[in-house]
Image (tube, rainbow, N blue to C red):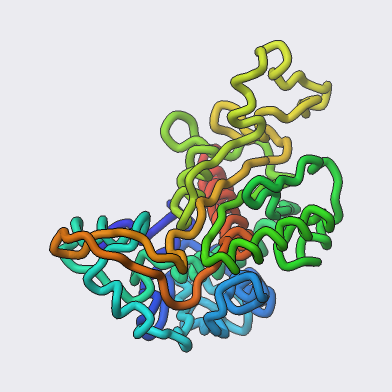
Amino acid sequence: MAGSSFGTIFKLTTFGESHGVAIGGVLDGVPANFQLDLEAVQLELDRRKPGQSAIVTQRKESDTVQFLSGILEGKTTGAPIGFIIQNDDQHSKDYDEMKDAFRPSHADFTYQIKYGIRDHRGGGRSSARETACRVVAGAIAKQMLESLGVEFSTYVDQVGHIRLIDTSFFLKEAIESNLVRCPDERTAEKMEQLIREVRADGDTIGGCVRCMINNVPAGIGEPVFEKLHAELGKAMLSINAVKGVEFGSGFASIETRGSAHNDLFNEDGSTITNHSGGIQGGISNGMPIEFRVAFKPVATIMKPQETINTEGEKTELKGKGRHDACVVPRAVPIVEAMAAIVILDFYLRNKSVTL
């Protein structure tokens, strides 16, 4: 199966299925002699893992990462970092009825058409469980970037129709102060209540994750086909359930005029506004990189739906098992991880541009 690798210099390849023995990855191009905080890597996984609260899937996985290579006494050696995460709590029988029927809006049908075979147990390779591997790689990338002064703030700013409007000021610590990972307490309470209502109804709902990256040096990114926002967009769209990405002013920019939208310069090269989201011409300009990632409602719902089986016959299917009613609270560390992978990869690529 192609398409399991991401990155140019800092490159991640993942493997494994949702209900297999384990998932894992190989991370190549990691700079040598960097002291890693392995506990911090595990903490990032804990932010993504299932069963962490009452509003997410109750699958119980420890998501404990085991490093196999590339690290000696806590330091990177420059060799590929191999790692695995055991799958401990699969309920494959929950998917027996789905073996011969396609879940609407899931990858079941397209995988069957493409490969002539699919792992129906939890979606196999198409399961969001694979994203745990990205969080491991992203946690390593984030530590290296933080040593260079780069800082990440990633949080939920919308669930369904409930949106955090004022994002101008909040305490970063507030992101982890509630189950939804929204830094505004009142908005978080409304989001949580909505998720609980949707869950009780056997349904699902979408939402949005906002990411801000501060102190990225100007000049990161490649022109034309590998623009910084293009690679960030690709990274985000590779995450399960993502349906859209906008940078800076995003789609709202179509309602403005150039005279109002242009980011005018200060004398030091910074800009008065940041409608560009920190990226111009596909290259970072030194301003904060800002983007939003839209997640659709989870496809598996606990309500009967009409579908077709592998013979093309109409049938009815009701979801079983343990699933998220809203994926965005657990998606926060995934978005941050993929962003860190992209920024570090471009940083390393940039070091080869000039003598």
Q: Residue at x 59, y 20 (%)?
A: 254
Q: Is 230 rendered above or below residue 270?
A: below
Task: Please give the count of numbered marks on the rendered protein.
Answer: 0
Check the image and name the residue furthest to the bottom: 88
- Residue depicted at 73% across the width and 53% down the height: 153
Image spot of residue 238 (x, y percent): 44, 53
In the image, residue 187 above or below residue 251 = below
The answer to whether 346 appears left or right of 311 in the picture is right
In which quadrant is the C terminus drawn? top right
Residue 351 versus residue 306: which sits nearer the camera? 306
Q: Is residue 27 visible?
A: no
Is residue 13 in view? yes
Horizontal side of residue 116 vs 307, given as left or right: left
Q: Nearer the viewer, residue 29 or 309?
A: 309
Q: Residue at x 62, y 49 (%)?
A: 160
Q: Nearer the viewer, residue 333 or 230?
A: 333
Vertical placement of residue 17 versus 339, above or below: below
Residue 174 in picture, x, y percent from top left: 82, 61
Q: Position of residue 196 (x, y in %)?
A: 66, 66
Horizontal side, residue 130 vs residue 136: left or right: left
User: What residue is shown at x 30% (from left), y 65% (from top)?
Assistant: 316
* Quarter of the picture holding the N terminus: bottom left
